[in-house]
Image: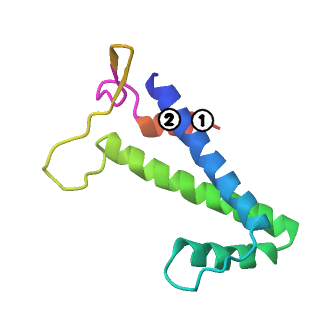
Amino acid sequence: MDPREFVASLKTSIQEVVDSEVSQMGSRIPSEIPDGPSRFAYLDRFAAWFQKLADADKETARDLLRFTAEGGLFATLTYLDNLATLVPGQGRFELWHVADGDRRLLNDPDGDLLIDLFNDLP
């Protein structure tokens, strides 16, 4: 796997997860789990709201969720590119792909930035 394949795979995965979650929201039946700070309570609330939307608004909501998820991925890539730091002055990230005895540095400081590869994708 090269850096471009890595970023493309992540972006595709993010889009598929969002699409799956949106699909589930459209058909979700409220659970019988009591309200509270559980994932199910949030899903029930979001699904109830989502199901009331017009079809065009559902598409806009899906696009917004994709945009937000991709923004989170972009932010993560800035850390892997060592453009942002979690704890200043405490090292850098090296991201390796290892397969069949082959090791490839995906965030080579002399290579393309992962965020640039991300921005080149549709």
Residue 27, position as x, y percentages in the image: 79, 65
In the drawing, does residue 84 fall left or right of residue 11? left
Q: Secondary structure at mark 2?
A: helix
Q: Amino acid at mark 1?
A: Leu
Between residue 45 and residue 15, name the one nearer to us: 45
The residue located at (71%, 77%) in the rendering is: 30
Query: What residue is shown with label 2?
Result: 7
| Observer-nearest of 110 and 37 | 37
Q: Main secondary structure of the magenta part?
A: loop
Q: Quadrant of residue 22?
A: bottom right
Q: Quadrant of residue 97?
A: top left
- Above or below residue 92? Residue 57 is below
> Tag 1's secondary structure?
loop
Q: What are the residue bounds of the magenta stretch?
A: 104-113
- The answer to whether mark 2 and mark 1 are in CB contact below 8 A is yes
Residue assigned mark 1: 121
